[in-house]
Image (spheres, rainbow, N blue to C red):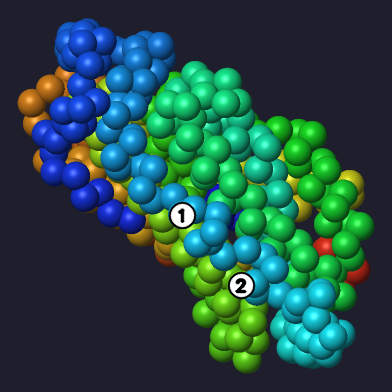
């Protein structure tokens, strides 16, 4: 699901026109009352977390039209079995032998990235709980659009960890028990979101993470293709495609928040940028390496799977997509200062990356990873 936003600790499309309201069939009297209350609240200097949750709940009809169509029905979705050797086929063993032969040509550093990506995906129970907390829903059979989106999104994401886990198991290239222990530690540790209970910050976080994950899996797919492993390229490409659709959804949500409550939205964005959006698995641990995330992120940076430059591009993308530079009326003094900070951030991150790149070149080292049987992988810290 989610990737690091500032590798090494260094640093989809919104199609609804601004001003669009939910379709008339979804505009109930209670919706209109909530909308009036929300508009009044937006004029205040600061919106509380419950007020922001009310904004999101008032968009249930909007979510029905703008989010749910981005989900794919189970009978039209790829499944992990489609991209791996068929275990019921007489040719299963031959298929596995072919998979292992191709995997034998993949270097350890790419396997480290694959394992890190998979471990992150496998902490899905934590992400599902966090997503529900943004809007305040906890009923497992709720029929509103937000609840259906949460369940549908979780079902689609669930395939990612399953697919990568089975692929890595079949290759024989990784220490499966060490990987499983890392997953166990991660789910036990939970996730530390810098959102501080604010649902706006939570959705901004998720939009960034989905786009980052799409980039990471896409770059991994390209690297696998360059190494001659078309099967692995298809696996990572399929996951990246899902993440692009999910990114589109969360980008639309935040875009609607900017339309309805621009001051609260831009201040939430500034807060998240100052806090740094990091991978939800930043506290991953294999039982030995306390710097495991930092080492994994450095490998991803060195391979070009996910880099600080990608992070700068992400900030720039969302600033443009959400029209941050063009916000005018409705901003408080704090909102204008937040706007200025966020608009200048991409260039600041790029300058930091140039400085860090020179520093990293002088600090190359080799680090053992339990995931690949303690073989050493070169990285720059």
Label 2 sits on a secondary structure element that is: helix
Vertical position of residue 338 compared to residue 49: above or below: below
Residue in the picture at 60% in, 35% down: 128
Q: CA distance from mark 2 to mark 1?
A: 18 Å
Q: Is residue 93 left or right of residue 64?
A: right
Instruction: Indicate the quadrant containing the C terminus: top left, top right, bottom left or bottom right.
Output: bottom right
Residue 116 at least partly seen: no
In the picture, residue 230 is in which quadrant? bottom right
Residue in the picture at 38% in, 28% down: 200
Instruction: Read off the residue under disc 2.
Output: 235
Q: Earlier in the sequence, mark 2 or mark 1?
A: 1
Looking at the picture, how far across and down is residue 215, in whole percent? 47, 63
Looking at the image, which is closer to me, 46 or 308? 46
Instruction: Read off the residue under disc 1.
Output: 72
Looking at the image, which is closer to me, 61 or 219? 61
Residue in the picture at 89% in, 65% down: 175
Q: Quick one: label 1, few (<14), some, or many (20+) residues within 10 Å? A: some
């Amino acid at each position: 699901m989610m990737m690091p936003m500032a590798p090494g600790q260094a640093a989809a499309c919104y199609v609804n026109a601004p001003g669009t309201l939910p379709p008339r069939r979804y505009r109930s009297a209670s919706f209109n009352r909530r909308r009036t209350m929300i508009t009044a609240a937006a004029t205040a200097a600061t919106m509380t977390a419950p007020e922001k949750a009310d904004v999101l709940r008032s968009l249930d009809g909007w979510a029905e039209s703008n989010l749910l169509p981005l989900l794919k029905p189970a009978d039209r979705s790829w499944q992990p079995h489609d991209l791996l050797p068929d275990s019921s086929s007489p040719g299963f063993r031959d298929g596995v032998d072919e998979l292992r032969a191709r995997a034998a040509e993949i270097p350890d550093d790419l396997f480290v990235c694959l394992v890190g990506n998979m471990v992150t995906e496998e902490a899905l129970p934590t992400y599902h709980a966090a997503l529900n907390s943004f809007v305040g829903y906890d009923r497992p059979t709720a029929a509103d659009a937000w609840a259906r989106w949460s369940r549908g999104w979780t079902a689609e994401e669930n395939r990612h960890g399953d697919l990568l886990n089975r692929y890595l198991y079949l290759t024989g290239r990784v220490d499966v028990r060490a990987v499983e222990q890392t997953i166990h530690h991660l789910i036990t540790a939970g996730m530390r979101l810098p959102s501080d209970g604010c649902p706006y910050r939570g959705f901004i976080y998720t939009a960034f993470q989905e786009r980052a994950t799409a980039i990471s899996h896409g770059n991994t797919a390209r690297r696998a293709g360059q190494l001659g492993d078309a099967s692995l390229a298809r696996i990572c490409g399929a996951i990246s495609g899902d993440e692009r659709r999910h990114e589109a959804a969360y980008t639309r949500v935040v875009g609607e928040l900017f339309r309805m409550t621009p001051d609260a939205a831009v201040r939430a964005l500034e807060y998240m940028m100052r806090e740094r959006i990091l991978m939800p698995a930043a506290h991953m641990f294999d039982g030995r390496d306390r710097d495991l995330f930092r080492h994994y992120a450095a490998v991803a940076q060195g391979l070009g799977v996910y880099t600080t430059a990608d992070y700068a591009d992400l900030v720039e993308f969302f600033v443009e997509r959400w029209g941050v530079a063009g916000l005018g009326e409705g901003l408080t003094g704090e909102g204008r200062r937040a706007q200025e900070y966020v608009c200048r951030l991409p260039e600041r991150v790029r300058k930091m990356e140039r400085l860090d790149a020179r520093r990293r070149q002088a600090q190359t080292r080799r680090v053992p990873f339990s995931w690949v049987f303690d073989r050493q992988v070169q990285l720059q810290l």
